Image (tube, helix red, strand yellow):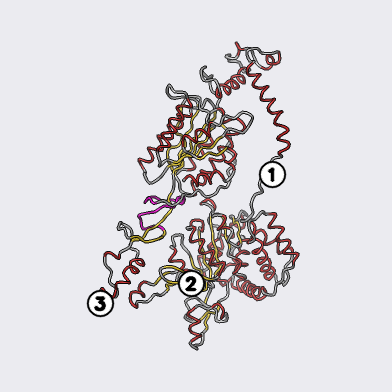
Amino acid sequence: MNTFQRTVYPFTAIIGQEKMKKGLILNAINPRLGGILIRGEKGTAKSTAVRALAALLPEIEVVLGCPYNCDPQDLAHLCEFCRARLKAGRQLKKTTDQVKVIDLPVSATEDRVVGSLDFEYAIKCGKPRFELGILAKANRGIIYIDEVNLLDDHIVDILLDVAAMGINVVEREGISYSHPAEFILVGTMNPEEGELRPQLTDRFGLCVQVEGVMDPKERVEIAKRREAFDADPRGFIARWAAEEQQLRERIVSARQRLSMVNISTEMIELIARLSLEALVAGHRADITMASAARTIAAWYGRTEVTEQDVYEVAELVLSHRMREAPPPPPEQPEEKQEQPEEKEEQEEQVQEQDNTDQPTDQTEELSPPPEQTNGESEESEPQEEDKQEDEDGQDLDSPPPAPQEKVFNVGLPFSIKRIARERDRILRKGSGRRSRTRTASRAGRYVRSTMQRGNNDLAFDATMRAAAPYQLYRCREDVAITIETVDIREKVREKRIGNFLLFVVDASGSMGAQQRMVETKGAILSLLLDAYQKRDKIGMVAFKGNTAEVLLPPTNSVEMGHKLLQELPTGGKTPLSAGLAKAYEVAKAHLNKDPDISPLLIIISDGKGNVSMGNDKPLVEARHIAGKICEEERIKTLVIDVEKNGFLTFGLARELAGALGADYYKIDDLKADTLVQAVKQME
């Protein structure tokens, strides 16, 4: 323990990162704040600060020989081991120990975290006994989780529940046990690797965003201090001993003062107002902010919470809980008044299109005569573009002019909910972080046991329970327990694997209207980022003109998908049937190569196909191909309708969704969480 303390970088020697250090100190003063989530880039002293804080904190009094580090002064929160000592009339001997930092690896299993049955003791003695987990060893210490966003969600749930209650309750493998588990939970994460669920993020009391130091002088000083520490750790720590002791004494003083700090009704009203302005969900933010305000007042040596205290902790408490305000609802009366005017305008536009063969004086001034439209003059180009748009929507017989392609910008990405699959009964292979599935490998969470024999590992606990009732009839010498073939149980495990998302994008000229392609690209970019975080494979098929093209074969390179998305041009007619056929071809080929992954086709179009591959009409051909896709149960589909609501709508995308057996959503849902929720339901 002393060796560990001598080799830890001093807390007070860390340059910058004041918010992170303040958040850690507040949790050290008041462990009931709920821990801290540190979000930021790699190499920003996150883990260094956590270990330095543990070395900085004063040693704590513990019961000698207690596996839970019980406080001998706190008789109300003793473990069963210490209570049994007192009941037997024995005195609890005291000793001191350094605050422990328990590293929780992302590969930790549930039984390793909460504890489980001690099988060795059960076999030797025939009695159940609880084997301590990480939560027991971390009592009155610090649990540090690097890359907490990569940890299985059910493990994070357990940690946050125990951190809030201060007690670990275990009900598993035929045992019922509880023990104290009060600890400071510190989680660090790099947002580039994916986000935590909002429900889990909200459970962390405080949250800070850290970035690398940008001042050149400070960066030079950081490098010099680290070099000096590596060259002579003892000498470096000795130079900072005075600052460390001063900070240590201040933390101890704040702990003693915390119970005497009062918070007025006015400050509680201010806290409630700040929470409402941040649009937080629930009341955890208000409760945590009040507790944090009392803690920071104790840190500053006061016994009364001030307005400045509330504002100072508000950033730490609300930064990960605040939500964006919903858009204002449309004004219904004005819309009703404008509808007749819009109808008249659209009727006038239709009438003008019908009278193009008899141009008026005004139309002659705005456009050249018909014999000039096929010329090569610059004035004829706008007319060709307008004609192309009309032909894209209606005229199927006359040959189209040269398409006017345009590359639209990519819209801004937005945060999306987690795309996850429901559990299935299929044994799948692979790796990833999206779909939960059964696995035949020894990696994954042990969820239950089975009598079916396969290649899974032995479920020792279930095997023991199956054999226990028959031990009186199975007499064998020198054997503690007799296990026969009928008793053997194997583990059923679950893990997460990646998926294959195939974007089928309509890149025809109609997508250029009303910035539809900008919005579509922004939504696809958001899903590409989510696919990177969930380790999915992606692919992209675009259809325009007379053909469909595979822009991106199945790959894990989201950067390539982003680049192709930026360069994707828009223009020409809509070969919908060709796009569906090409997507079906790619999906089938991927299924033959990797049967464990079920492709999801995300079709983004208005459904107005006007080019066919054969002799059938375009829409009839598209419905026929959609029926073939629907027959393939392993291929899931989702249709996003890009047609805007207006006076005249065709509803062809909805019909396409019906032929595909797919869920149907409008283009406006691309900017909301509805799209990803739809993908979740479909999978």
The CA distance from mark 3 to mark 1 is 78 Å
Q: Residue furthest bottom?
A: 89
Rendered residue at 42%/40% (across/down): 635
Q: Does 434 lie within the magenta span? A: yes
Q: Which residues are magenta?
A: 425-444
Secondary structure of the residue carrying tag 2 is helix
Q: Which residue carries the number 1 mark?
A: 328
Q: Relative to 534, does residue 114 appear above or below in the rendering? A: below
- Closer to the chain start, of discs 3 and 2, is 2
Residue 175 appears in the figure: yes
Secondary structure of the residue carrying tag 1 is loop
- Closer to the chain start, of discs 3 and 1, is 1
Secondary structure of the residue carrying tag 3 is loop
Few, some or many residues within 10 Å of mark 3 (<14, 14–19, 20+)? few
The CA distance from mark 3 to mark 2 is 35 Å
Q: Which residue carries the number 2 mark?
A: 136
Count every numbered label the image shows and give the total.
Answer: 3
